[in-house]
Amino acid sequence: MNFSYGDYVSSDGKRLPLTIRQGVSETNPGWFELKDVFYRDLTGDGIAEAIVRLWHVQCDGLCNGTDLFYIYTTRNGKLKNLWQYETGTYTYGCGLKYVMFGNKQIVIELFGRCSTQAMVSPGPAKFLVEDLTFSIFEFDGRQFTPSLTKYIPESLSNVKNWEPQIWID
């Protein structure tokens, strides 16, 4: 509920300190909100990592939300960030369809063709997205790194009010 995640870098390159207090951090215009914290050994060392899910809302006439994930482990009594990832929005593309956290692997699927994190790729209309992006991240002994990204042709989908699935294996 109370934690400093360091600097958040927005898609336009602006840095702002991201500190959550009582589950929320207000920014102008928008906010970050703690959604979930899960604990699971993802690195195979027998010690559970913390998987943190934040919801990041930005408002510029219309408010759009993205999922922001962090994975932390402890090393020498200190927290160490192993992975962070921000999706795009359901409004403009690259919103989260699902994510699966497993043994030394993260599988994520996004709506749209998403070549970078926090990608904004407008479809033909708001909430209407074609195709899917399937990505796998693998633990290399120090952090989770991309090992595969694949684009999957898919017919136009309306993703308004989509609730992503989160699996922890």
Image (spheres, rainbow, N blue to C red):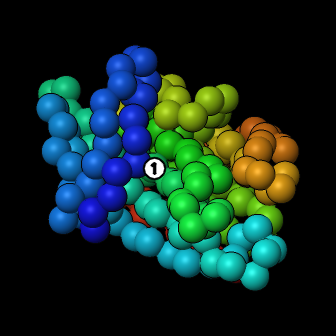
Q: Outermost residue toward the front?
A: 76
User: Which residue corresponds to the image point at 54% horizontal and 60% vertical from the top-left?
Assistant: 79
Q: Quadrant of the C terminus?
A: bottom right
Residue 124: image x %, image y %?
A: 46, 27
User: Which residue corresponds to the image point at 27% horizontal and 43% vertical from the top-left?
Assistant: 57
Q: Quadrant of the N terminus?
A: bottom left
User: Which residue corresponds to the image point at 26% horizontal and 36% vertical from the top-left?
Assistant: 58
Query: Is 69 or 151 nearer to us in this picture?
Result: 69
Taking 18 as reference, is 73 left or right? Answer: right
Q: What element carries label 1?
A: strand
Tell me where residue 74 sits by quadrant.
bottom right
User: Which residue corresponds to the image point at 71% horizontal and 60% vertical from the top-left?
Assistant: 106
Residue 54: image x %, image y %?
A: 38, 56
Residue 65: image x %, image y %?
A: 33, 45
Disc 1 marks a residue whose amino acid type is Leu
Label 1 Cα neighbours within 10 Å, binned few <14 / some 14-19 / many ≥20: many
Taking 58 as reference, is 103 left or right? Answer: right
Q: In this view, does 116 lie above or below 43?
A: above
* Res. 19 visible in picture: yes
* Res. 124 visible in picture: no
Residue 160: image x %, image y %?
A: 36, 51
Q: Mark 1 points at which residue?
A: 68
Q: How many marks?
A: 1
Query: Is 66 or 152 nearer to us in this picture?
Result: 66
Q: In this view, does 48 lie above or below 43?
A: below
